[in-house]
Image (cartoon, rainbow, N blue to C red):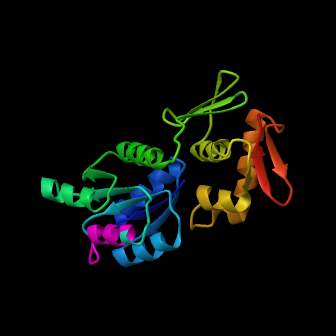
Amino acid sequence: MRVLIVEDDVRLRGMLRDFLREEGFAVDEAADGGEALHKALGWDYCALVLDVMMPPPDGFEVLRRLRAKGRTMPVLMLTGRGALPDRLQGLNSGADDYLLKPFELSELAARLRAAIRRSAVAPHPVLTVGPISLDTVARTVALDGRPVVLTAREFALLELLARNRGGVVTRAEMDAQIFDERGDSMSNMLDVYIYKLRQKFGKERILTRRGMGYQLVA
């Protein structure tokens, strides 16, 4: 899942970026409203984490312009302003959730995942492909009923394959959703993660479709 963090506080933006990457998200960044609009209008993000208090255009205006352009990705707004009128303004502008500063990073990740699940046309909290079962809420995986320990990035890749339910996922799609603008995939990291998943679930479960991508089969 690829998300965009919009925060002008360099220290906080770095904390959010590093934590969400550890949680398995692909993360892009924007330091102001103008950069946020450029990136969010040019890329189909799974969600935005959007700070309210920025130099113009502020978070409210960024959100208003995105919704006016038909961008429907979930938006989690961050603010130190706790007054009810400010919260209402954010929600009325099209925000999906609102988190007051200071907050726990784990709560932000949980709210972000919940917003992404709610935005799905047909959310599936538990994904099952043959003997593999993924609980996308508890973030657990089992093979034939036995728990399998995955890193956050391995879980994200397996979830992407499972959500396609037997369809082929191209390398481009994986690059877009699993990696971010740092360009991790340029170092063949995708191949490394596929290899690790095959070690844990069997190479017969994750097939290479030459010239197309990868497929998780039952």
Whole-percent x, y for residue 165 in the image: 69, 41
The picture quadrant where one finds residue 189 is bottom right
Quick check: can you spot residue 38? yes
Query: In this view of the protein, which residue sits in the foreground, 179 or 10?
Result: 179
| Residue 142 drawn in magenta | no
Image quadrant in which the C terminus is located? top right
Main secondary structure along the magenta-highlighted residues: helix
Whole-percent x, y for residue 148 in the image: 65, 29
Quick check: can you spot residue 8? no
**Which residue is depicted at the point 16% across and 53% down?**
82
**Which residue is depicted at the point 37% across and 78% down?**
34
| Residue 66 drawn in magenta | yes
Whole-percent x, y for residue 173 in the image: 66, 59
Q: Is residue 5 left or right of residue 162?
A: left
Please give the range of residues in magenta: 54-67
The picture quadrant where one finds residue 8 is bottom left
